[in-house]
Image (tube, rainbow, N blue to C red):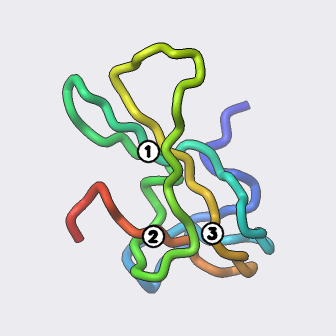
Amino acid sequence: MYKPLPDSLTIKTSKVNGLGLFAKEFIPIGTNFGISHYKLYEPEKIIRTPLGGFVNHSNNPNCVKIELHNSNGHTYNYKRWNLVTVKDIKKGEELTLRYTFYNI
């Protein structure tokens, strides 16, 4: 069954901007939530999953985007990134990311 968000996350009103991703429980450092962004080359554009669409910017983020690499040697016309925690996240805390694709 498709789930747009992991069970440990929810979407709520953010003090940063609009809606944001929030922890429903304690989340340890190094947690990989899955794909947050795709970058297509033809036509060139960024596609956000629900993870990427609701995570807000911070200059002191608790998550990063990790670029995924293909291990089978094939070349594709896109790149993809996973959202991974770089700090422990407390229950109720907003997940944040340093924006690198968009101007803020």
The residue at 69%/80% (across/down) is 92
For the residues labelled 3 and 1, say whether their Cβ atoms are less than 8 Å apart.
no
Q: Amino acid at mark 1?
A: His
Mark 1, other Cα within 10 Å: few <14 / some 14–19 / many ≥20: many
State the separation of the CA atoms marked 2 and 1: 18 Å
Instruction: Decide if residue 88 is on the left or right side of residue 46.
Output: right
Earlier in the chain: of badge 2 and badge 3, it is 2
Q: Amino acid at mark 2?
A: Leu
Taking the image as shown, residue 83 lies to the left or right of residue 76, namely: right
Q: Is residue 49 above or below residue 14?
A: above
Pair 2/1: label in front: 1
The numbered mark, 2 or 1, whose residue comes first in the sequence reads 2
Image spot of residue 13 (x, y percent): 49, 76
Q: From the viewer's perspective, is the residue at label 3 or at label 1 nearer? A: 3
Q: Secondary structure at mark 1?
A: strand
Label 2 neighbour load within 10 Å: few <14, some 14-19, many 20+: some
Q: Position of residue 21 (x, y in %)?
A: 56, 67
Which mark is on residue 37? Answer: 1
What residue is drawn where x is 75% and y is 55%? 7
The label number, if any, that marks residue 86 in the structure image? 3
Task: Give the CA distance from mark 2 to mark 3.
Answer: 21 Å
Q: Nearer the viewer, mark 2 or mark 3?
A: 3
Q: Residues within 10 Å of mark 3 (few under 14, many from 20)?
A: some
Quadrant for the N terminus, please.
Answer: top right
